Image (tube, helix red, strand yellow):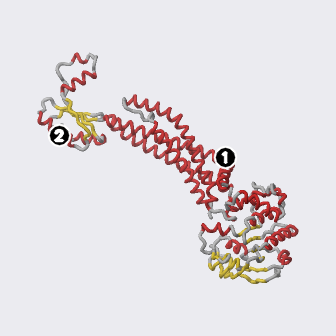
Amino acid sequence: MVRTRYFFSETFNSLKRNFFMGFTAITTVAITLFIVGFFAIIVYDIQGIMSSIKSQVELRVYLKDEISEELKEYIEQEIISWEETESVEYVSKDLALERFKKQMEGSDILKEIEGNPLPASFDITLNNPEKIDQVELRFYDKDGNFIEGVDDVIYERKVVKPLFSITAIIGTIAFLIIIALLLAAIVLIFNTIRLSIYARRKEIEVMKLVGATNWFVRIPFLFEGFFEGFAGSIISIILLYFIGNFLLIKGERAIVDIMRIKELAIVGSGNVMLYVYVGVLVLGGLIGILSSIIALRRYVKV
Amino acid sequence: MNMIEFKNISKIYEDNTVALKNINLVIRKGEFLFLVGPSGSGKSTFIKLLIKEIDESNGNIYIAGRNVCNLKSSRIPQLRRNIGCVFQDYKLLPNKTVFENVAFTLEVIGKPAYEIKIRVPQVLKLVGLYSKLNSYPHQLSAGEQQRVSIARAFVNRPPILLADEPTGNLDPGTAEGIMKILSRINLIGTTVLMATHDRNIVNSMRRRVVELEEGEIIRDQKRGVYGD
């Protein structure tokens, strides 16, 4: 086909003519999408870490030794009936001691223990750990004392609370940076297209004069914009593959070590990376086409 | 057959200048017509209306019997393929050779390569530039450049050829050569409409002359002269 060849050669010539502008646009797209991809993985990662932390968040309700069997059963039923409750486990005094012994195996502390000083408890796992405060309050009466039969309520308040706000902050910052970068990429491609429209204004004038259709005039510019977006996304994928993978795996190891989380293999699971690659590719192409459409609407009137 | 018909055409620009006032004119197929008048008399507006570069304020224009005033914008390219245009400043593409400049018209409207290879040399022979096939516009004289532009306008064999001051930048001898080519194109059956204020050319050709003044037709004369 004459036309296909024509479009490709026009696109190629135009890219050659505006090499530096095109190069800048492609680089910007590459950097932008790299950061987009990087943040996407980080956010995904943090979510993964969060959910594994969340699933470990539990509320432990220590019971008084002298609690009656009836009251104990009543409290258990009550806990089960709450919608925030994922599961509840009764740990008797004996079981608590057994677990403690296992945990402390070989330690001198065991020799010091006489009898069983450990209280029985209900270990509650919540389906929405953000409601932990609410649930805790139910174990207090209106004077601020524990309800009958309950000795204490504990959970890892210090870890949980800040984590929620940190995720929210990171998410917001990442989102804002991504939006700003996407806009920058769009503006840059828009500019290269505008320049190539300007460089070819005489040709466009002649084209319209001899009866070229609108699409015939537009397609080379759409190709050009698409190519710039696409090339940028390919570069960002290569960057993500090498740098991203390396950094993220290291960072993740560190987080896992610090937080002492056992089950985590986010970056290792190839699917997530694949989704990010495909997303970046689609985004790159869209940015390119979108920018050229905006430029064409403004500068090529029929 | 009426090739071009203006019925009560008026054009008032956004700044309220009246370019054309109630123009009625019939141009028959195969006619050669000079549109004369001083600058600002409405000649360019006349030509721009024909190729739908601008829209009329009032009235109707018929081309080959079809009313083009309510033409959808997607149909405008089709209209322009039937009207060749030649301008005072040639509008050649400097980075393309003579052959490529002429072939561009055909490429743009999607003609196949073999047709381009046959038609371009043909039309270049018609304008006498076959030997300069591979030259670039800057290597040509002004007259030669105008001939390339005529070749480009005519390569698609449009039934109408519009020329807006085609000899405006040329010396009398060169202008005469251009007129010979336009006459030849007219002889093949093409309707030619040429806007000019070149007195000598109009007087030597003795064709139909339509004179515009301040947007109105003040004279329409067969085998006319430029006037006083």
Nearest to the observer: residue A248 or residue B108: B108
Query: What residue is disc 1 on?
Result: A19
Residue under the image location 76 percent in, 76 percent down = B30
Residue A31 visible from this viewpoint: yes
Q: Which mark is residue A77?
A: 2
Location of residue B192 by image quarter: bottom right
**Depth check: B119 or B148 in front?**
B119
Q: Looking at the image, which is closer to me, A57 or B32?
A: B32
Horizontal arrangement in the rendering, residue B130 relative to residue B27 (left or right): right
Taking the image as shown, residue A133 lies to the left or right of residue A39, namely: left
Dots 2, 1 in contact, CB < 8 A: no
- Tag 1 secondary structure: helix
Q: Chain of mark 1?
A: A
- Residue type at mark 2 is Gln
Residue A282 location (% of width, % of height): 52, 47
Picture quadrant of residue A139? top left
Check disc 2 and report its element: helix, strand or loop.
Answer: helix
Residue A96 in the image: above or below residue A203:
above
State the image coordinates of residue B65 (x, y, percent, origin top left). Answer: 66, 78
